[in-house]
Amino acid sequence: MERKLTTKTIVITGMFAAVIAVLAQIAIPMPSGVPITLQTFAIALTGAVLGARLGTAATGIYILLGAVGVPVFSNFTGGLAIIAGKTGGFIWGFLFLALLCGAGATLKNKPLGVAAGLIGLIACHLLGTLQFSLLTGMNFPESALLVSVPYLPKDILSLILAYALGLQIRKQLLRAAILPPQAPKKAPL
């Protein structure tokens, strides 16, 4: 099935990249250097609303904007130094989070949809912890206890809320013909 890129899909994708950038600024600094932000919520919401393809595209746009220096990352930062820095693995992990939240949003089985998003969240945390570990010289378990485990309850709650809200927004955007129609997929057996 060929998918046509329309002005509506370009605009909605760009709008969600902007939503991610705005919610990234709601940040609480932490001693580890990894702030508590609403980025996880924003990425999960983007995937749930736009689906895997457009959600990942919006997240990629957000990352590219930050990479070229636009201050879209938390605390109004940007540039390759952030992506290559100790929190950069989480930023790369956002691509997996958006992809799997988006794929989960199109499943008929809602618990499996949430599970797909949780797998994306785990991938995000693994990449973030790995890069933090490599750049700080801490071993992986110590890094996980510092920059992943304390954030997991907030991130899991963010993902579930984003999924529930995102499905409602997605339904309305589909009804208004703003998003391209897509039949829900059955979960593999």
Image (tube, grey):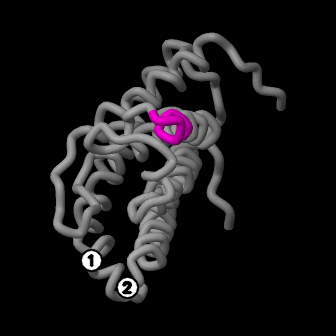
Quadrant in the picture for the N terminus = top right
Q: Is residue 97 left or right of residue 39?
A: right
Query: Of helix, strand and loop, which one carries label 2?
Result: loop
**Quarter occupied by residue 165:** top left
Q: CA distance from mark 2 to mark 1?
A: 10 Å
Q: Are marks 2 and 1 in contact (CB under 8 Å)?
A: yes
Q: Earlier in the sequence, mark 2 or mark 1?
A: 2
Task: Find out whether residue 68 is within the magenta segment.
Answer: yes
- Which residue is at a point 51% across and 48% down the rendered structure image? 80
In this orientation, which residue lies closer to the viewer: 88 or 149?
88
Is residue 109 among what the camera can see? Answer: no
Q: Is residue 66 left or right of residue 158?
A: right
Q: Which residue is mark 1?
A: 146
Q: Which residue is mark 2?
A: 138
Quadrant in the picture for the C terminus = bottom right
**Res 42 label:** none
Query: Of helix, strand and loop, which one carries label 1?
Result: helix
| Residue type of the residue flagged with mark 2 | Met
**Quarter occupied by residue 141:** bottom left
Is residue 123 among what the camera can see? Answer: yes
State the extent of the magenta-drawn residues as a range: 64-69
The local crowd at label 2, few if under 14, some if 14 to 19, many if 20 or more residues have their Cα within 10 Å, is: some
